[in-house]
Amino acid sequence: MRHFFLPRPRKSIFSCFSSLVLEENNFTVNARRSHEREST
């Protein structure tokens, strides 16, 4: 994995972080929607 991060460390880390954030946002949004459906 190190040789993969060496050429462009910032871009790789940033892309990984952004993808993680996007997944987390999607998960929270889906959870909220399902919770709203249950409560109503």
Image: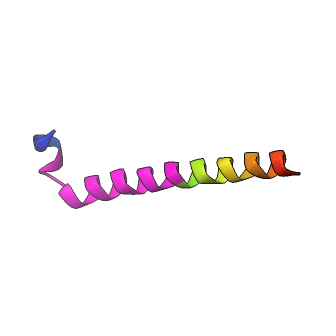
Left or right: 40, with 34 as reference point: right
- Identity of the residue drawn at 67% across and 47% down: 30
Where residue 32 appears, as percent x and y from the top left, is 70, 53
Q: Residue furthest front?
A: 39
> Is 8 colored magenta in this rendering?
yes
Left or right: 7, with 32 as reference point: left
Left or right: 34, with 2 as reference point: right
Part of the protein shown in magenta: 5-24
- Identity of the residue drawn at 42% across and 50% down: 20
Where residue 17 appears, as percent x and y from the top left, is 36, 55
Where residue 3 appears, as percent x and y from the top left, is 10, 42
Seen from the viewer's position, the closer of residues 11 and 38 is 38
- Identity of the residue drawn at 65% across and 53% down: 29
What is the basis of the colouring in this image? rainbow
User: Which quadrant holds the N terminus?
Assistant: top left
| Main secondary structure type of the part rendered in magenta | helix
Seen from the viewer's position, the closer of residues 15 and 27 is 27
Q: Residue furthest right?
A: 40
Quarter of the image holding residue 11? bottom left
Quarter of the image holding residue 15? bottom left
Where residue 27 appears, as percent x and y from the top left, is 58, 47
- Identity of the residue drawn at 51% across and 51% down: 24
| Total numbered labels | 0
> Is 13 colored magenta in this rendering?
yes
